[in-house]
Image: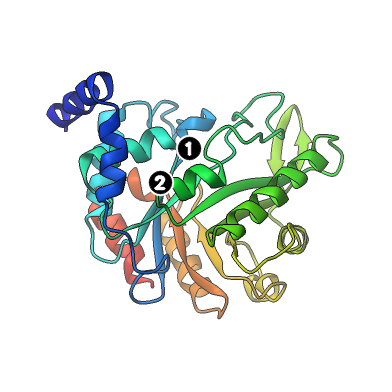
């Protein structure tokens, strides 16, 4: 990968138009859900929000060559249907030629930097709907944290609603990741109780002038059958930071049996598993579908 990284660096410096040509050559996925109607999407949009930590290593995702190598391993595994990332990462993957046949989702709002005093203010600093369509991608993802006590929340909801409409107008998926959040001891915390997740679903489902293209990206929490009774929208389960892999896989398997659930969007727990076996972790996740 180090040699291929040097090629990317040279290409970016001397032939930036190669990114556009790679996007135009890319073989698109037949469906954002994959051939079997189930999505296994690898998430890699964490670095753009300053979230580089995995487990006890605060800089785990800082080495771009290592991250790209792990992404290439994951994307090559049977059953992996797509990837979610910011422009810098997706363009590296385009130059590596590993996105053929994969659904590609652009990460849109990365302005709420992890650990910052303005973390709730998730401004749209990444892709917009026009750029996603122009690149021939399948949809966009937006983190939508709802903090009732923070005055920044209305603008977050407004911007997410606008993105939902702009994606839908282009026939693209709007992947909304809602959380009910609150400031605690100077940190923004997500409320993962069932009732809080239900409320976040209700709010996110109503964003925009249409929900025809809206998917929800949701955490696995207690009482998932009751939680997911709150929506008819397609749901993808997020992975988050996994401390107990066996418990996480068991909870994913149980939730995947519910009718609205259409797959998984998992990043760090598959790209940086405790045993460092990326292929094994991805294959195990795919086996749940």
- The structure residue drawn at horizontal position 23% and vertical position 48%, both measured from the top left corner, is 98
Q: In terms of secondary structure, where does tag 2 sit?
A: loop
Disc 1/disc 2 C-alpha distance (Å):
21 Å
Q: Position of residue 254 (x, y in %)?
A: 50, 74
Q: Is residue 199 above or below residue 88?
A: below
Which colour style is shown?
Answer: rainbow
Say if residue 122 shows up in the picture.
Answer: yes
Nearer-N-terminus badge (1/2): 1
In the picture, residue 198 is in which quadrant? Answer: bottom right
Q: Residues within 10 Å of mark 2 (few under 14, many from 20)?
A: some
Q: Nearer the viewer, residue 138 or 239?
A: 138
Where's the C terminus, which quadrant?
bottom left
Q: Which of marks 1 and 2 is in front?
A: 2
Q: Measured from the top left, where is residue 194 in percent x and y?
A: 72, 63
Q: In this view, does 151 lie above or below 9?
A: below
Is 29 situated left or right of 199 in this image?
left
What residue is shown with label 2? 135
The correct choice, above or below, for 122 with respect to 249 in the image is above
As rendered, which of 267 and 39 lies closer to the eye? Answer: 39
On the rendered image, what quadrant is the N terminus found in?
A: top left
- Residue at position x 31%, y 45% in the image: 23
Towards the viewer: 59 or 50 = 50
Q: Residue at x 22, y 25 (%)?
A: 11
Percent position (x, y) of residue 74?
Answer: 27, 52
- Residue 242 visible in rendering: no
Question: What residue is disc 1 on?
Answer: 46
Secondary structure beneath label 1 = loop
Task: Tell which of 16 and 101 is nearer to you.
Answer: 16
């Amino acid at each position: 990968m180090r040699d291929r990284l040097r090629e990317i660096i040279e290409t970016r410096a001397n032939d930036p138009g190669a990114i556009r040509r790679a996007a135009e050559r890319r073989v698109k996925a037949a469906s954002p859900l994959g051939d079997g109607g189930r999505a296994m999407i690898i998430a890699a949009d964490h670095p753009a929000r300053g979230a580089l930590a995995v487990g006890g290593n605060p800089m785990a995702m800082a080495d771009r060559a290592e991250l790209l190598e792990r992404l290439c391993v994951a994307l090559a595994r049977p059953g992996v249907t797509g990837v979610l990332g910011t422009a810098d990462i997706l363009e590296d993957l385009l130059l590596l030629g590993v996105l053929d046949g994969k659904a590609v989702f652009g990460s849109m709002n990365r302005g709420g930097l992890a650990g910052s005093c303005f973390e709730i203010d998730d401004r749209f600093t990444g892709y917009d709907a026009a750029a996603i369509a122009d690149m021939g991608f399948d949809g966009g993802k937006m983190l939508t944290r709802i903090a009732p006590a923070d005055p920044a929340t209305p603008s977050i909801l407004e911007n997410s609603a606008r993105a939902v409409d702009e994606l839908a107008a282009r026939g693209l998926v709007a992947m909304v990741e809602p959380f009910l959040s609150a400031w605690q001891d100077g940190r923004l915390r997500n409320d993962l109780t069932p009732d809080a997740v239900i409320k976040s679903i209700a709010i996110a489902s109503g964003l925009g002038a249409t929900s025809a293209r809206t998917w929800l990206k949701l955490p696995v929490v207690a009482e998932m059958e009751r939680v997911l009774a709150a929506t008819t929208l397609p749901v993808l389960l997020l992975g988050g930071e996994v401390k107990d892999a066996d418990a996480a896989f068991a909870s994913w398997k149980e939730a995947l049996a519910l009718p609205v659930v259409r797959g998984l969007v998992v990043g760090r727990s598959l790209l940086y598993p405790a045993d460092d076996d990326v292929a094994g972790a991805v294959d195990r996740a795919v086996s749940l579908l």
